[in-house]
Image (spheres, grey):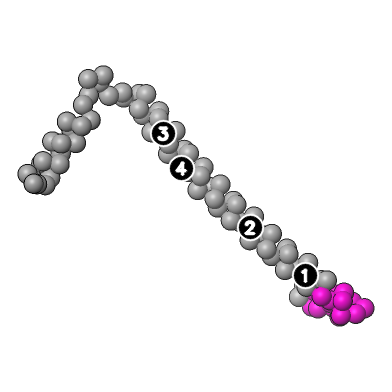
Amino acid sequence: MTLRQEAYAMIDSLPDDDSIRFFIDMIRQFNVVTKKTEQIFETEKSLSEKRQAFLHMEEMKQKYPFPKDYDYEQVRRENMEEKYGCVN
């Protein structure tokens, strides 16, 4: 007897329609919980990967710090000028 046949036999052995409805509701709830659990695991995995990337960036920032007199705005202006030229 296959697993599917065993499941059908169990359903057939239920005494009334209410029992069958209860059984079907349990299966539906199980499917919903399973899907939600999978979504949670995927979200945690995604967050874990992002967290690892962030920690790696922080580690690199500490390992290779910018000079104290580094002017972010000046570098941005120079790169914008180099890429786009003079835009008025």
Q: Outermost residue toward the top?
A: 68
Segment colored magenta: 5-21
Relative to 69, residue 83 above or below: below
Q: Secondary structure at mark 1?
A: helix
Cβ atoms at labels 3 and 1 below 8 Å apart? no
Q: Amino acid at mark 1?
A: Asp
Identify residue for label 3: 56
Residue to which mark 1 is pinned: 25
Q: Is residue 84 visible?
A: yes
Q: Is residue 19 magenta?
A: yes
- Answer with mark 1 or mark 4, whichever residue precedes in sequence: 1
Mark 1 or 4, closer to the camera:
1
- Residue at 58% across / 56% down in the picture? 39
Residue 32 location (% of width, % of height)? 68, 63
Residue under numbered circle 4: 50
Q: Badge 2 is on which residue? A: 36
In the image, 15 versus 74, the foreground residue is 74
